[in-house]
C-alpha cells in the first residue's frame, strides 16, 4: 500500500510540525508514505471565491502529483473534501478517516493527560461525514472523537455547541471579517468555558483562525492539530 | 446592499449580537429536540423533498387542477405575473368592495411584493395582525426573519414601540403585559376591518383549498370576521393532494419553532356564506428560477426559517443585513436570481459550513447553491476587481511549484523580519483581530528533504 502524503499549502508553509506529525504517525503504523515534492494547493481558495476557472489547473496539477499512489492522505478535511468533489478522486482520505476506516487503529501506547476540546470542522463533518451532524437525526458517531477516546489520560470535554462553525471559511475570513471574528471568538469561549487546556481539530485552517484570535487575546488555551496529539500518543 | 458592511455595523454592539445569536440558537435547539424525537425524521425530509420534486416537475398541471377545483368551490382565482400585477389585482378586489381597512396575517409574499405601501398609498389602512409583524410594522421596519419577524427587538424595545403607538405604560417591558396590550389593540382592528388578507402555506391541487399555519389564530379571526378573504400565494405553494399535507405539517412547525405542529392549521376551502374568497397566484420570478437547473430546488422552500436559526452568520449579522425580504441562507440563493448585482454579496455571506442544507426539512442543497451562485457572480463581473485579480494570480502561482515555493519563502521571511507596523496595518484585514501564524524556519518540504533523504 503506497500512500501519497498530501500536505495542504498553508500547512506546508506555516505549520510544518503538523506535516511532520502526520508523516511520523503514518510511519509508526508501518505504512509506506511518500511526499510528492511538487504539490501546491488543492484549488479550493479560488473555487470557493467564485473563480472556479482559476482553480482547474491547480486541481489538475494535484492529480498529476498523486497519480501513482494507492491512497492519498492529508491532515485537512476541507482540502480533502475539495479534492473529492472537484478532482473526483475516491482514494483521497482525511487523516482520521484513513486511520479509522482503512488502517483501523485500535490503540495508542502513550498517555496524554490533558483536557482537550475538539473543534469539528464543517467540511470534515458535514462534507466527509467524519461525524454525525447535530442537525441530522440518527446515531451519533465521530471518527475523531473515537480516536481521541482511545488515548489514555486524555479528557475530552463536552461543548455547549458541538459542531458550530468557527468562522474561518477561506476568503470568508477576510470578506466577512466582523462575523468571522465573532464566530471564532464564540467558539473559543465555548472551549474555555468547559476548561479545555488544548483546542484541537482536524483542519489547520480552522485552527489557524482560532489560534490567531487566541494569540491576539492572550488566552492560555493551546492549539494543536489532532495529528500532533495522535502522533504524541502513538 | 453590502452584507459585510451591514454585518460589521451589527457587530459593533457585541452584547446585542450575542443576545441575537443566543435567541436564535435557542430556537435551533428546540428544533433539535422536536426532530430528534421522531425516528423517521430523515425519511420525512426525503418524502417532503420528493413530493416537492414532483410538484416542480408538474407545476403547470397542478396549478390548472388547483384553479379548476378552487373555482368549483366558489373561489375566484387570479394570476399575477409579478409583484406589480399582484398589488394591482389585490387593490382592485378591495376597491370593488369599498374596503378602507383591512387586516393581514403573515405573508412573506405580500412583503416580497411590497403590498402594504402600495395599498396605503391608495388610501387603505393595512394592519399586520401577527404579533411580530405588527411590532415591525409599528417600528416602520421590514421583518428580519420570516417566522420571527421581530426577533431583532428586545422586549424593552418592543415596550418603547408599544408605548409610542398603542399607549402602553412608559418603560413597561413585561412580555405578558405587552402581549395582552397588543391583543386588545389588534382586537379593535379586527372588529373594524372590512377585509382579510392571508398568505398560504400549502395549496392542495386535489381539493382547491389552501392551508394557513399560524400560532396566534389571527388568520382565522380575520377571515371569519370580514366578508372578504384574499389569499396570496406563490406558484410553488402547491402540493398535489390533501394526504401530502400530513408530511408537511409534521416538518414545518418542528423545523420552524420546535413545536410539534402550529397552534392553528386553518383550512380555507370555499367562501363562507355571504362573503367572497379570492386567491391570487403569483409568479414574480419563480418560473424563471424553475428554469435554472442548478437552483430549481430552492423552490422547495416551505419558509420554515430553520436555515436562518442554524446559520452562524445570520445569527451574528441579523436579518436586515441581507437587504432582501427573505434573509439568511435561503434568501441568499433566492435573491441573486432576482437581481444578481444588487445581491452579489449574499452568496458570500456564508462560510459554506453546510448546516443550512443539513437542517432543511425539504432538503434544499443550500450551500451547494451558494457555491454555484458565487461562480455566476464572478463570471458576470460582480466580484471586486482586486479579488478577481488575486484569484487569477493565486491560480497561476499554484500551477508553478517552484514559484509557489519561492513566494512562500519570501512570505515566511518577511513575516519574521518585518517590524509589526509593516505587517499589521489597515491593509491587513486578517490582522485586525487576529495574529498571523508565527513563521517557521523551514517549510515542511524543506524538513522532508533533510529528514527523509533516501526517498529522494
Image (cartoon, coloured by chain):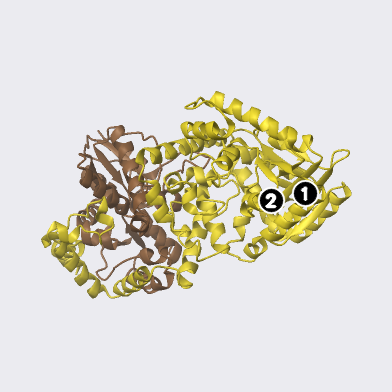
Chain colours: A brown, B yellow
Looking at the image, which residue is at 83% across and 51% down? B76
Percent position (x, y) of residue B244? 73, 45
Label 2: few (<14), some or many (≥20) within 10 Å?
some
Asked if the residue under mark 2 is in contact with the one under mark 1, i.e. CB atoms within 8 Å, the reply is: yes
Answer left or right for A180 relative to B346: left
Q: Secondary structure at mark 2?
A: helix
Of B451 and A216, the residue lying toward us? A216
Q: Which residue is mark 2?
A: B119
Image height check: is B269 above or below A194? below
Q: Secondary structure at mark 1?
A: helix
Percent position (x, y) of residue B340? 52, 65
Of B17 and A120, the residue lying toward us? B17
Looking at the image, which residue is at 47% across and 72% down? B379
Q: How many marks?
A: 2
Percent position (x, y) of residue B223? 76, 38
Q: Chain of mark 1?
A: B
Q: Are marks 1 and 2 on the same chain?
A: yes
Image height check: is A171 above or below B255? below
Label 1: few (<14), some or many (≥20) within 10 Å?
many
Quadrant showing the C terminus of chain B:
bottom left
Answer left or right for A177 relative to B81: left
Percent position (x, y) of residue A155? 28, 33
Looking at the image, which residue is at 57% across and 58% down? B334
Q: CA distance from mark 1 to mark 2?
A: 9 Å
Residue B301 visible to an observer of this rendering = yes
Q: Chain of mark 2?
A: B
Q: Which residue is mark 1?
A: B94
Q: Which of disc 2 and disc 1 is earlier in sequence?
A: 1
Amino acid at each position: 500500500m503506497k500512500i501519497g502524503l498530501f500536505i495542504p499549502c498553508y500547512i506546508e508553509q506555516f505549520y510544518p510540525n503538523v506535516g511532520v506529525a502526520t508523516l511520523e504517525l503514518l510511519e509508526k503504523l508501518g505504512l509506506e508514505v511518500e511526499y510528492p515534492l511538487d504539490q501546491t494547493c488543492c484549488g479550493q481558495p479560488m473555487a470557493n471565491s467564485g473563480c472556479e476557472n482559476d482553480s482547474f489547473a491547480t486541481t489538475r496539477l494535484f492529480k498529476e502529483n498523486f497519480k501513482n499512489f494507492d491512497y492519498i492522505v492529508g491532515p485537512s478535511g476541507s482540502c480533502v473534501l475539495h479534492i473529492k468533489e472537484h478532482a473526483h478522486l475516491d482514494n483521497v482520505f482525511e487523516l482520521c478517516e484513513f486511520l479509522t476506516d482503512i488502517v483501523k487503529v485500535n490503540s495508542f501506547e502513550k498517555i496524554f493527560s490533558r483536557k482537550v476540546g475538539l473543534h469539528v470542522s464543517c467540511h470534515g463533518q458535514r462534507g466527509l461525514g467524519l461525524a454525525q451532524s447535530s442537525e441530522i437525526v440518527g446515531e451519533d458517531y465521530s471518527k475523531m472523537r473515537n480516536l481521541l477516546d482511545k488515548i489514555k489520560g486524555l479528557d475530552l470535554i463536552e461543548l455547549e455547541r458541538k459542531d458550530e462553525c468557527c468562522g474561518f471559511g477561506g476568503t470568508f475570513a477576510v470578506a466577512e471579517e466582523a462575523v468571522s471574528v465573532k464566530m471564532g471568538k464564540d467558539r473559543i469561549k465555548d472551549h474555555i468555558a468547559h476548561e479545555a487546556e488544548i483546542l484541537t481539530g482536524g483542519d489547520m485552517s480552522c485552527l489557524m483562525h482560532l489560534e490567531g484570535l487566541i494569540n491576539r487575546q492572550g488566552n492560555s488555551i493551546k492549539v494543536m492539530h489532532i495529528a500532533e496529539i495522535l502522533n504524541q500518543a502513538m | 446592499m453590502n452584507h459585510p458592511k451591514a454585518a460589521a455595523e451589527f457587530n459593533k454592539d457585541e452584547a446585542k449580537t450575542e443576545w441575537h445569536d443566543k435567541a436564535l440558537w435557542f430556537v435551533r435547539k428546540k428544533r433539535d429536540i422536536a426532530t430528534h424525537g421522531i425516528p423517521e425524521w430523515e425519511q420525512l425530509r426525503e418524502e417532503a423533498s420528493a413530493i416537492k420534486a414532483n410538484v416542480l416537475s408538474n407545476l403547470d398541471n397542478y396549478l390548472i387542477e388547483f384553479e379548476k377545483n378552487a373555482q368549483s368551490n366558489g373561489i375566484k382565482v387570479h394570476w399575477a405575473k409579478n409583484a406589480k400585477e399582484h398589488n394591482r389585482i389585490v387593490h382592485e378586489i378591495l376597491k370593488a368592495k369599498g374596503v378602507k381597512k383591512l387586516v393581514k396575517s403573515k405573508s412573506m409574499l405580500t412583503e416580497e411584493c411590497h403590498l402594504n405601501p402600495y395599498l396605503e398609498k391608495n388610501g387603505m389602512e393595512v394592519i399586520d395582525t401577527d404579533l411580530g409583524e405588527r411590532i415591525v410594522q409599528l417600528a416602520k421596519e421590514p421583518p428580519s426573519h420570516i417566522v420571527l419577524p421581530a426577533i431583532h427587538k428586545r422586549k424593552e424595545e418592543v415596550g418603547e414601540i408599544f408605548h409610542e403607538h398603542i399607549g402602553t405604560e412608559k418603560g413597561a417591558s413585561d412580555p405578558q403585559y405587552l402581549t395582552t396590550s397588543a391583543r386588545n389593540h389588534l382586537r379593535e382592528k379586527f372588529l373594524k376591518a372590512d377585509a382579510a388578507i392571508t398568505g398560504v402555506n400549502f395549496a392542495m391541487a386535489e381539493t382547491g383549498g389552501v392551508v394557513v399555519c399560524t400560532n396566534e389564530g389571527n388568520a382565522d379571526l380575520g377571515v371569519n370576521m370580514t366578508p372578504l378573504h384574499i389569499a396570496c400565494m406563490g406558484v410553488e405553494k402547491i402540493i398535489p393532494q390533501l394526504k401530502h399535507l400530513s408530511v408537511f405539517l409534521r416538518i414545518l412547525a418542528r423545523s420552524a419553532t420546535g413545536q410539534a405542529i402550529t397552534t392553528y392549521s386553518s383550512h380555507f376551502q370555499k367562501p363562507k356564506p355571504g362573503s367572497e374568497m379570492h386567491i391570487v397566484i403569483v409568479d414574480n420570478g419563480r418560473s424563471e428560477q424553475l428554469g435554472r437547473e442548478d437552483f430549481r430546488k430552492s423552490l422547495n422552500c416551505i419558509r420554515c426559517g430553520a436555515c436562518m436559526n442554524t446559520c452562524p452568520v445570520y445569527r451574528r449579522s441579523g436579518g436586515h443585513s441581507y437587504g432582501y425580504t427573505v434573509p439568511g441562507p435561503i434568501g441568499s440563493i433566492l435573491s441573486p436570481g432576482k437581481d444578481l448585482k444588487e445581491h452579489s454579496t449574499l452568496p458570500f455571506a456564508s462560510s459554506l459550513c453546510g448546516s443550512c442544507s443539513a437542517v432543511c426539512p425539504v432538503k434544499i442543497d443550500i450551500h451547494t447553491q451558494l457555491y454555484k451562485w458565487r461562480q455566476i457572480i464572478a463570471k458576470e463581473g460582480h466580484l471586486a476587481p482586486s479579488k478577481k485579480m488575486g484569484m487569477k494570480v493565486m491560480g497561476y502561482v499554484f500551477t508553478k511549484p517552484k514559484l509557489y515555493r519561492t513566494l512562500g519563502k519570501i512570505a515566511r521571511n518577511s513575516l519574521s523580519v518585518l517590524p509589526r507596523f509593516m505587517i499589521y496595518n489597515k491593509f491587513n484585514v486578517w490582522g485586525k483581530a487576529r495574529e498571523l501564524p508565527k513563521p517557521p524556519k523551514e517549510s515542511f518540504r524543506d524538513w522532508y528533504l533533510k529528514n527523509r533523504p533516501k526517498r529522494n
